[in-house]
Amino acid sequence: MEQAKIKSMYNLDETIAGELFEGKEYPWEVLPEISDFIKRLGPTLDPEKFDKRGEDIWVAKSATVFDSAYLNGPLIIDEEAEVRQCAFIRGSAIVGKKCVVGNSTELKNVVLFNNVQVPHYNYVGDSVLGYKSHMGAGSITSNVKSDKTLVVVKARDGEEIETGLKKFGAMLGDNVEVGCNSVLNPGTVVCPRTNVYPLSPVRGVVEADSIFKSQDNIVKKK
């Protein structure tokens, strides 16, 4: 499960939340701590660069937030991010520099690294999206199993890691591309530079530099 570790998945220089990942091995370990981390980090942000908007909400002055977007704390929106019409940010969210949170996109308990795009009709909950990752229109993270049991991360070689988490969406590494209308099932880990075909139901660990065509048809990039 080496590829699913933080050191293999993410460039921590590309997030305001680098400290959140320190001392942890796997990225899903940050999920229970996002809210408290924002409450600690927010008051330390430069008031010349960030406005405080309501309780536990900090928005960079250079960010664009449309009037119809809903913002709930704890929340940090970093510099030059764009939060478009009717976006619904439920709280416990870190939106990185130059991110795009699009129309009717919903965020909850997430870290979006810099330059992430979730631009059209996406649901992203209990997830971490790496630098320059992109979710196509209508693609979502499913964050609770249908039987409500705790999420287990499963590699294709049979290795399993019990997370102890009931809510766990997806971990996307840096430069991951997710095709339109795909569903990332609970406990999905997509390693860096991998592409997921549109309309894909994805589960388990997908190795780096792959093309996910279906659960039984994953090929390495040439």
Image: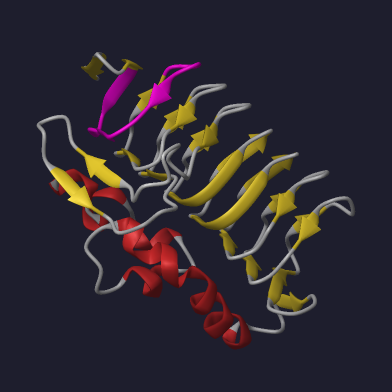
- Residue 56 place in picture, x, y as percent: 68, 78
Which is more toward the observer, 16 or 169? 169
Magenta region: 197-212
Height in image: 18 above or below 188? Answer: below
Residue 4 located left or right of residue 88: left
Residue 98 in view (yes/no): no
Name which residue lies at 40% across and 40% down. Answer: 186
Height in image: 20 above or below 202? Answer: below
- Residue 54 place in picture, x, y as percent: 79, 77
Name which residue lies at 63% across and 36% down. Answer: 122
Residue 19 in view (yes/no): yes
Please say whether residue 208 is one of the residues in the magenta stretch: yes
- Residue 111 place in picture, x, y as percent: 50, 58
The quarter of the rendered structure image containing the N terminus is: top left
Name which residue lies at 58% across and 81% down. Answer: 39
How many numbered marks does the figure carry? 0
Please say whether residue 10 is one of the residues in the magenta stretch: no
Question: In this view, which residue lies farthest toward the right?
Answer: 67
Height in image: 155 above or below 56? Answer: above
The quarter of the rendered structure image containing the C terminus is: top left
Which is more toward the observer, 150 or 217? 150
Residue 203 figure quarter:
top left
